[in-house]
Image (spheres, rainbow, N blue to C red):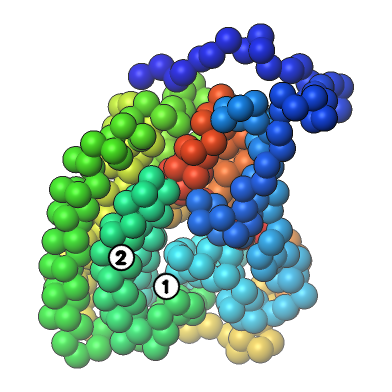
Amino acid sequence: MAPYEPDRSQYPSKKADGTLDIDLTSGKYLKLWQGPNHPGITGNMSVELTVCGDEVVEGKTHVGYLHRGFEKLMERRTFIQCFPIVCRICVPEPDFNEYCYAAAIEELAGIKSPERADWMRTLILEMGRFNSYMMYLGGQSGSFGLGVIGQWTTYARDLMLDRFEELTGARIYHMFILPGGVRDGLPDGFDKRMEETLKVAEQTLKDVQNVMFTNAVFQKRAIGVGYIDPKLFDTYGVTGPNARGGGVAKDVRKDQPYLVYNELEFEPNIGTDSDIFTRADVRRRDALQSVDLIRQLLAKMPREGELMAKIPNVLHWKIPRGETYIRGECSRGEYGYYLVTDGSGYPRRVNVRGPSYTHAMALLERLIVNLNISDVAGLMVSLHTYPPEIER
């Protein structure tokens, strides 16, 4: 489906410094701010809009309204002290940061996590993926006026947080995945309680399908809006559901399997229209897929064996000089950690590759041009971004 292309001759040209050559006092153009507290902004960021009537001429993103500077903070802390920091980089899906950081340390330190720990890690990541999609579906529907969907998905997400709490002792920041393995195994009766949660999740997603995706208003506002040309995927670093919604089956779990994903049966969900509606549908199917993967993990997971490899005293841990890049597939696409060590007890350099950086800045600023003001929130949510990954 081709994007709407108006007559661009009516729009002003850009000056050498990249700003628009417009006179805001003329009355033809108006500058508006959406965020940082607007509910259509996924987290504390802001979009500076220049509009002509109700059509966006230019949009510039502004971040930094939330906690930030994680990468530099980590250079002043020991390796183990960084764990309470990394999970804050993505609050709705914190466990992926724990995994990437732990896996990077393990590779540089020559440590192999036990097989049972890898199964536990994969379970944790799929639980987090499901929770992230529940938050997204509520936000996407809410941006187009369907508030009840968010109440349903928040309830399903809250039940999964109950499972996180009994497994890790915490609901949001778990700090469960550590270098060498995980902190503990499954508690007694966990399988039964998880199955009860998964049944509610399936019913919730069925209700979402019936009420949201068959809704004429949602279809009218989402189909054909926010189109991403697949030719831009590589140029803009588009990954995850944003790419799979355009027919490109990018999924690190399949392209470069890690943990125990090669033991599980699944195929990446894809769409063809590359618009808001298609991206939402891909994520809905991804959430259902996570439910299935959790069931597979609990059915195949070994219940005996080590959960932690032998590691040095973490208070005096010095990791040999080296560098590595660890990547995986979070709910928003490829997530990676570039870690450099110099033989001391502190990381020399940490760089986090979160999908939000490319999706919520360069890509958003391109897609937002010619959009109606009322659709800005829907477009922003459809890219599924978490701003702390940007100002990190």
Q: Disc 1 residue type?
A: Ser
> Which residue is rendered at x = 15% and y = 54% of the image?
206
Tell me where residue 315 appears, x and y as whole percent. Answer: 66, 89
Q: Is residue 380 above or below residue 30?
A: below
Q: Which mark is residue 113?
A: 1
Q: Quadrant of the C terminus?
A: bottom right
Q: Position of residue 306 (x, y in %)?
A: 33, 83
Instruction: State the image quarter where residue 205 is shown.
Output: bottom left
For residue 68, above or below residue 254: below
Mark 2 vs mark 1, foreground winner is 2
- Identify residue type, mark 2: Gln
User: Looking at the image, can residue 249 be seen?
Assistant: no
On screen, residue 103 versus residue 27, left or right, reads left
Residue at image location 69% in from the left, 87% down from the top: 316
Residue in view at x 28 percent, y 57 percent: 149
Q: Secondary structure at mark 2?
A: helix
Instruction: Measure the alpha-carbon separation of dots 2 and 1.
Output: 39 Å
Q: Earlier in the sequence, mark 2 or mark 1?
A: 1
Q: Residues within 10 Å of mark 2 (few under 14, many from 20)?
A: some
Where is residue 157 drawn, in percent x and y?
Answer: 31, 69
Local SS, label 1: loop
Is residue 132 left or right of 83 when viewed as pictured? left
Q: Which residue is mark 2?
A: 151
Circle 1 packing at 10 Å, graded few (<14), some (14-19), many (20+), is: many
- Image quarter hosting the N terminus: top left
Q: x%, y% of residue 314? A: 61, 86
Q: Quadrant of residue 101?
A: bottom right
Q: What is the number of callouts on the image? A: 2
In front of the other: 244 or 280 = 280
Q: Is residue 73 visible?
A: yes
